[in-house]
Amino acid sequence: MRDSLLPFALSTKVDESNICRSPAAEAVLKKVVERSGVADEFEIDSCGTGGSGHENWYKLDSKDHWEEHKDRTVDERMIDALKKRNLDPYSDSRPLEPEDFQKFDYIINMNNENIEEVQKAAQYWKDDLQKAIPSNWKDKVQLMTTFMMKGEYQGAAEVPDPFHGGPEEFDKVLDMLEDACEGLLSHVESKKFATES
């Protein structure tokens, strides 16, 4: 069975549309698993919350709600930062959907605010819409910084939003994501090894 990892976008008015950190996390994580020779064992995707800044985004029809964002590409400054590291963004902008809780083993978030949005969405889809949300859905929702290994990043509360900063902020985000994605792969591999032993 393939492991499924979903790097997740921060839900704010500036990075709510899956166009900055989450596609960067997807690109970094895909490179990390490829470099480790295990790319065929993983399915990796990214998505966002909020879209147009709607507080109750998860109660809206995602197709209509996300219409204005569907053709948007990754922030040009993030593209530049990714290209410097020979990385390319992979995803078109899309929202988190109920099916993601079935499809993915991990839903990785950039900060605690994002986790709250995901939890609200999952609870609503499960309780109010009777969607097939698995019983272990809370275990799937993780914070990206949990997996950071380097001393300078350990204990970080979030992967910061570089939107209002300069190139150095975008580089810092990629540094953090590279560290966290290495840690995430290590975590998944050790968990898999423990299960198989």
Image (cartoon, grey):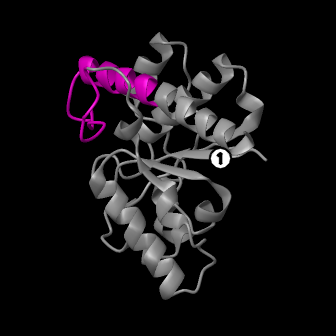
Q: Nearer the viewer, residue 114 or 94?
A: 114
Q: Is residue 12 visible?
A: no
- When asked about the image quadrant of residue 76, the answer is top left
Task: Indicate yes or no whether the magenta region holds residue 167.
Answer: yes
Which residue is drawn at the image coordinates 35% and 26% (left, top)? 176
Q: Give the magenta-colored segment's residue range.
A: 152-180
Q: Position of residue 196 (x, y in %)?
A: 74, 41
Q: How many marks?
A: 1
- 69 relative to 36, above or below: below
Q: Is residue 23 visible?
A: yes
| Tag 1 residue | 4
Q: Nearer the viewer, residue 143 or 70?
A: 143
Mark 1 Cα shell of 10 Å, populated few (<14), some (14-19), many (≥20): some
Q: Position of residue 147 (x, y in %)?
A: 42, 35
183 left or right of 195 in image = left
Task: Indicate yes or no whether the magenta region holds residue 166.
Answer: yes
Name, please, the residue furthest toward the front. Answer: 197
Query: For the residue marked with disc 1, what is the amino acid?
Result: Ser
Q: Nearer the viewer, residue 130 or 97?
A: 130
Which residue is drawn at the image coordinates 45% and 47% (left, top)? 18
